[in-house]
Image (spheres, grey):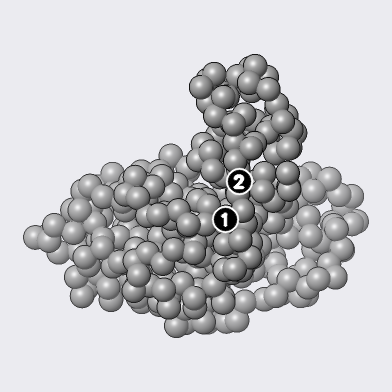
Amino acid sequence: MSDLGNWVRLAKLEAPRKAVALLEHFGSPEDVLDADVQSLAAVENVSKPEAERIHRMAGEPVDKELAALEKNNIAIITWRDPNYPQNLRTIFDPPVVLFVRGEIHEEDRFAVAIIGTRRPSEYGKSMAMSISRDLAERCLTIVSGGARGIDTVAHWAAVNAGGRTIAVLGCGVDVAYPSENRDLYDKISRNGAVISEYVPGTRPDAWRFPVRNRLISGLSMGVLVVESKLSGGAMITATIAAEHGRDVWAVPGSADSSVSEGPHRLIKEGAKLVESADDILEEMGIEVETPAKQPKAVPDNLTPEQKLILQALDLQPKHVDQIIAECRLTPAAANSSLTLLEMLGLIRRVPGNAYVRAI
């Protein structure tokens, strides 16, 4: 059995928490699929019927899925991959495999999700467009679900601003859903990523979309809701975001509009009221007066120490002593690396002998 084929088989389980537990117990996809039913059932939360299904999967063909990967230029990022999104590792049930059209970059961890109703007002579309554009111009990645309405507006605004955006689908990445977004997904894949935890060819069944909403939240530092009724995918995602410890923001609307009910409820419950991108930038500790700029490419020739520091920093100030402790560096090595990273414009020094990541 090929290694890639076995990762595909684990993805087909569509049980991320169990798949990760099996990997941690057995060590590799091959070992999982080679295990007997009794050994599989001994893993916590794996029932005997589930163990029997996993055992049978070892012999199931995945030629169709592997052919689709090659035909559609789809990459996979596995749980074991060092390029697996850092933000996503922190959630309770991260997918064991991500199928990706395009590329996920390390700086995509500085992401904001913009979501909302599939039937927005002109006001809602205007707000989503301006906020997404302004955030993308300041090198934040825009995450959304590729759905009609607010999602599509947010993606297009980021694309047209020359920024990065990630579309998280509730179907295979080779399935254009909705069909009118085929061109959008092609454009996103050139400067961002279209991703899914579902194997190629998976149809957009309704139940998959609430499940994928955890990835929209998981990839992001915060979630902005632009127009939503009290029930629906956007409110589900906002609830998940709060559980993930992410910031939740909401755009207020007209008091007599049904699509204002969701954001207004969130604001009453403590979500940050957002009228422009500046409100989000201030919450994230980014200087709002800083002009839009091109993203800084991370050089390939950074030392291991410099890479460690860059990975440890985000938009919240971190004292130099904390950096030294987390990265397990000597003060001399840390200080020299910090100086060079600051000279390259990759980090900024802030008051209190602390540093933040520059984006």
What crowding class fits label 1: few (fewer than 14 Cα within 10 Å), some (14-19), or many (20 or more)?
few
Q: Nearer the viewer, residue 11 or 193?
A: 11
258 relative to 247 in the view: left or right: left
Q: Nearer the viewer, residue 348 or 60?
A: 60
- Residue at 43 percent across and 78 percent down: it is 183
- Give the x, y percent position of residue 346: 71, 70
Q: Quadrant of residue 116?
A: bottom left
Q: Quadrant of residue 23?
A: top right
* Above or below, comparing residue 254 to residue 33 in the picture: below
Q: Amino acid at mark 2?
A: Pro
288 relative to 37 in the view: left or right: left
Locate the C terminus and report the quarter of the image it occupies: bottom right
- Give the x, y percent position of residue 285: 53, 62
Q: Nearer the viewer, residue 346 or 348?
A: 346
Which label sits on residue 64?
1
- Judging by the rendered image, the residue that carries numbered circle 2 is 61
Locate the N terminus and report the quarter of the image it occupies: top right
- Residue at 13 percent across and 57 percent down: it is 258
Asked whether the viewer can see residue 177, the reply is yes
Q: Nearer the viewer, residue 343 or 196?
A: 196
The answer to whether the residues at label 2 and label 1 have Cβ atoms under 8 Å apart is yes
Q: Secondary structure at mark 1?
A: helix
Q: Amino acid at mark 1?
A: Lys
- Residue at 68 percent across and 22 percent down: it is 36
Q: CA distance from mark 2 to mark 1?
A: 8 Å
